[in-house]
């Protein structure tokens, strides 16, 4: 069998981190909200916004006055825009009666374009919602994923679709694996593969990553 770098990275990270049980949310709807709020801001700001909700349900967000909703999510930044995005993605969820199993009975091929047509929902947000809220096997690509690809390197272009297709092509179509893989990429980037100065010495990928020798 040909050497599979994507799988090898997964196995190395998994040996080091184990199962991380992402996403940090109590409900699938909270995942949806977090996926929108985390656009262009740090997760710590999302947490501050999330705890402002007295009721984090789709019904509450749907019924909430948009100015009040914007005030609730103010800590996440771009709050007026994001309040509109939350209303829009909640309206999409209403098409499925706010019911997770009803969404899960649909196909990924139907749902992904649907979500991408919702205002404010780009590829990373759509894939995060589909994977972490609904358990569909769609690989999430973010800045941490692209950084790993560049530094390791995986020698692929850094466009969202190319990176996503690369991992999906090299890995079994498995939502649990994609879930943990993305979580491990994020945590490894935060702990070791930092943006300005990677701390390669203690990185679990150091033996195979070429960057450390540059
Ligand atoms: S060895 Fe260094 S460059 Fe490579 S993934 Fe780890 S921290 Fe990043």
Image: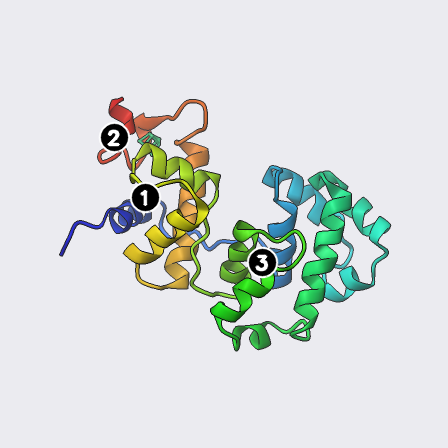
Q: CA distance from mark 2 to mark 1?
A: 19 Å
Question: x, y (%) of residue 5?
Answer: 24, 46
Q: Earlier in the sequence, mark 2 or mark 1?
A: 1
Instruction: Tell me if label 3 and label 2 are in contact, CB under 8 Å.
Output: no
Closer to the observer: label 2 or label 1? 2
Figure quadrant of residue 200: top left
CA separation, marks 3 and 1?
34 Å
Q: Quadrant of the N terminus?
A: bottom left
Decide: few, some or many residues near mark 1? Use Cα within 10 Å; few <14, some 14-19, many ≥20: some
Locate residue 193 relative to residue 114 in the image: left or right.
Answer: left
Circle 2 packing at 10 Å, graded few (<14), some (14-19), many (20+), is: few
Q: In terms of sequence position, does the residue under pointer 3 or pointer 1 come before the other?
A: 1
- Name the residue: 27% across, 51% down: 7
Identify residue for label 3.
Answer: 116
Q: Which is nearer the eye, 84 or 76?
A: 84
Residue in the image at 53% along x and 52% along y: 123
- In the picture, measured across the screen, residue 92 lies left or right of residue 188, that is right
Q: Nearer the viewer, residue 7 or 169?
A: 169
Q: Nearer the viewer, residue 191 or 42?
A: 42
* Residue on which the image places disc 1: 16
- Kindly indicate whether the residue at mark 1 contacts the one at mark 3 (C-beta within 8 angstroms): no
Locate the C terminus and report the quarter of the image it occupies. top left
Q: Is residue 70 left or right of residue 28?
A: right
Q: Which residue is mark 2?
A: 210
């Amino acid at each position: 069998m040909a050497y599979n770098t994507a799988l090898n990275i997964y196995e190395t990270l998994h040996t080091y981190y184990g199962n991380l049980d992402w996403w940090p949310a109590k409900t699938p709807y909270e995942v949806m909200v977090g996926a929108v709020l985390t656009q262009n801001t740090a997760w710590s700001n999302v947490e501050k916004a999330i705890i402002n909700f007295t009721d984090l349900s789709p019904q509450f967000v749907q019924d909430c006055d948009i100015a009040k909703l914007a005030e609730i999510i103010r800590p996440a930044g771009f709050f007026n825009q994001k309040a509109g995005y939350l209303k829009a993605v909640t309206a999409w969820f209403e098409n499925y009666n706010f019911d997770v199993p009803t969404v899960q009975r649909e196909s990924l091929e139907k749902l992904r374009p649907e979500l991408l047509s919702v205002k404010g929902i780009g590829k990373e947000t759509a894939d995060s919602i589909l994977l972490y809220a609904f358990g569909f096997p769609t690989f999430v690509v973010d800045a941490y994923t692209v950084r790993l690809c560049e530094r390791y390197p995986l020698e692929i272009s850094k466009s969202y679709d190319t990176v996503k297709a690369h991992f999906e092509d090299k890995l079994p179509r498995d939502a649990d694996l994609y879930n943990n893989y993305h979580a491990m990429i994020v945590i490894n980037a935060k702990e070791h593969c930092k943006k300005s100065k990677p701390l390669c010495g203690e990185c679990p990928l150091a033996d195979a990553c070429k960057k450390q020798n540059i």
